[in-house]
Image (cartoon, helix red, strand yellow):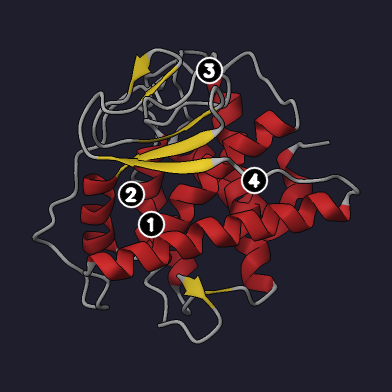
Amino acid sequence: MGESAGRRRPGPLAGLLVAVVVAAGCMGGGLDQGEPQQPGPRHTRQPASPGAQTTRADGTTSVAEFKQDFNDAVGSAEAYWTARFQASGKRFQPVRRVVPYTREGEVSCGGQRLPRNNAVYCSAGDFIAYDVNWSVAAFRQIGDAFLFYLLGHEYAHGIQVRLGIRYNFTIQQELQADCMAGAYLGDSVRDDRLTVEEGDLDEFREGLLAVGDDPDQPWFAEGSHGTAEQRTDSFFRGYEKSLDACGLG
């Protein structure tokens, strides 16, 4: 996945699979006060770090490419939500910062330390933080689409905070963020701001069936994100029907 203005062709959306696994470790929007020491999450399980030795054949391997695609993902999410807020007559304030980290506990949010192999949105300081080593490894193994889903899901938590959306259960917050990420990506493709290759969505749909909460996990448990079927449905509902399908009203 990439921006349309002369960028290289995107990798398959199946690459978004890992981002969904990451999202299972992300926290929802509402943590307490704090600035990055440089954030700490509610999380249910730690995704295994992808092996950097396994790389895609589409050339998405260098650190320079990672930085470019990561910046594109941040920029496209900011542009999308800026336009949506303006269309509704509201002023949009982008997420304040995106914070990379390399060691467990290097970054904290509200006194909680972030583990490795994770990406989160912290409402306390209004920032997104991610394990850069793990993210680069996933980028090399899977492709650039990973970054766009990862940023889309975490940015959606920032939007939930800006809209004052709070739920009693984590799963409600997370499935809505999946829907919002789908809407951002789907609308961006329809607006020719992002590109996908033919067959990518089918690959993503099939891959997404392999992820999600354990079927035996109670839906109301702290940190629940939803089954593979629930997450797939939420994402594609947003992708196909835009934000109207995400219950933001």
The residue wearing badge 3 is: 31
Q: In which quarter of the image is the C terminus?
A: top right
Residue at 40% across, 66% down: 69
Q: Residue 146 carries which label?
A: 1
**How many neighbours does mark 4 have within 10 angstroms: few (below 14), some (14-19), or many (20 or more)?**
some
* C-alpha separation, residue under disc 1 versus residue under disc 4: 21 Å
Is disc 4 placed on a helix, strand or loop? loop
> Mark 3 touching mark 2, by CB under 8 A?
no
The answer to whether residue 232 is left or right of residue 42 is right
The residue wearing badge 2 is: 18
**Residue 230 point in image, percent of width and height:** 53, 37
**The disc labelled 4 sits on which kind of residue?**
Pro
Is disc 1 placed on a helix, strand or loop? helix
> Mark 2 touching mark 1, by CB under 8 A?
yes
Residue at 41% across, 81% down: 9
- Asked whether the viewer can see residue 188, the reply is yes
> Mark 4 touching mark 3, by CB under 8 A?
no
**The disc labelled 2 sits on which kind of residue?**
Val
Q: In this view, does 54 lie above or below 120?
A: below
- Asked whether the viewer can see residue 239, the reply is no
